[in-house]
Amino acid sequence: MAHYVDLHSHFLPGLDDGADSLATCFSMVRTLVEIGFSDLCATPHQFAGRFETPLDQVRLVFDQVSREIASELPEVRLLLGAENYWDDVLANRLRQGEPPCYDGGKAFLFEISPAVMPPRLAATLFDIRVSGRLPVLAHPERYVAVQRDPAVAESLGRQAALLVDLAALSGNGDRAEVKTARRLVEEGVAHAAASDMHQLEDGAAIASGLVWIEKRLGANAVRQLLNENPRRILVGQLP
């Protein structure tokens, strides 16, 4: 096991558009372990109007899965977070000082609308950083503003950790997303990479994205993007 850290995955069953059963959950976890991950962050969607599972229910599912995984794969460490949509729910939780963070720490994962960049996003992220939290932006390669202008990613990356999807690096999928993800990694703008696994079939593209990093940038880049930087992010440090 290479002891990679996956900051973004949807293996918890029945909570969002990820795993649909406990059996699928276990298969997804095994696949990620085979790829080389030892620390897996469950990040079910929190999205007003679409995925609104109460956080206490999310915790119950996570605890059940953790017990089962611990008995079968004791070398695997599971952590709980959330993929928070940039909406009023997250805004209220931030005001109350209670956003769903990784493992109850300082860093939290969020996503925005692909088509429209929220107004004053960089300034708001700065305020969040000043408050002691570390925002982590999921799949920046999907956002049209980032695809059009690399400077947008550089600006956001000064206040938030940028977390690209491994599947985008593989070359599969939307051409603009592939091009943008690879550029962010090659130019050192991306801070880390993650699986964003939703279904078992995603495994091949995730593994392929990891191979692309190693072939293009070497083993040191793999270690930085999948081990060293994710561990820093988990403790609230911007790499």
Image (cartoon, helix red, strand yellow):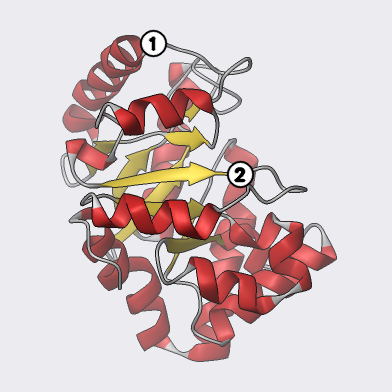
Residue 89, visible in the rendered structure: yes
Question: Amino acid under label 1?
Answer: Pro
Looking at the rendered image, the disc whose residue lies closer to the viewer, 1 or 2, is: 2
Q: Which residue is mark 2?
A: 112
Question: Amino acid under label 2?
Answer: Ile
Q: Please identify the quarter of the rendering in which residue 96 is found.
A: top left
Q: Quadrant of the N terminus?
A: bottom left
Residue 153 x/y as whole percent: 58, 70
Along the line of sight, the residue nearer the viewer: 164 or 25 = 164
- Tag of residue 129: none
Residue that lies at the very extreme toward the right in this rendered image: 175
Answer with left or right where residue 139 lies relative to residue 83. right
Residue 107 x/y as whole percent: 28, 49
**Mark 1 neighbour density, 10 Å: few (under 14) some (14–19) many (20 or more):** few
Tag 1 secondary structure: loop
> Would you place residue 106 above or below residue 184 in this image?
above
Along the line of sight, the residue nearer the viewer: 157 or 129 = 129
Q: Quadrant of the C terminus?
A: bottom left
Q: Please identify the quarter of the rendering in which residue 145 is found.
A: bottom right
Tag 2 secondary structure: loop
> Would you place residue 34 above or below residue 101 in this image?
below
Give the total number of marks visible in the rendering: 2
Answer with left or right where residue 205 lies relative to residue 93. right
At horizontal 47% and vertical 34% (from top left) the residue drawn is: 84
> Would you place residue 57 above or below residue 214 in this image?
above
Along the line of sight, the residue nearer the viewer: 224 or 36 = 224
**Alpha-carbon span between mark 1 and mark 2:** 21 Å
Q: Earlier in the sequence, mark 1 or mark 2?
A: 1
Residue 125 x/y as whole percent: 42, 54
Residue 44 x/y as whole percent: 46, 29
Q: Which residue is mark 1?
A: 54
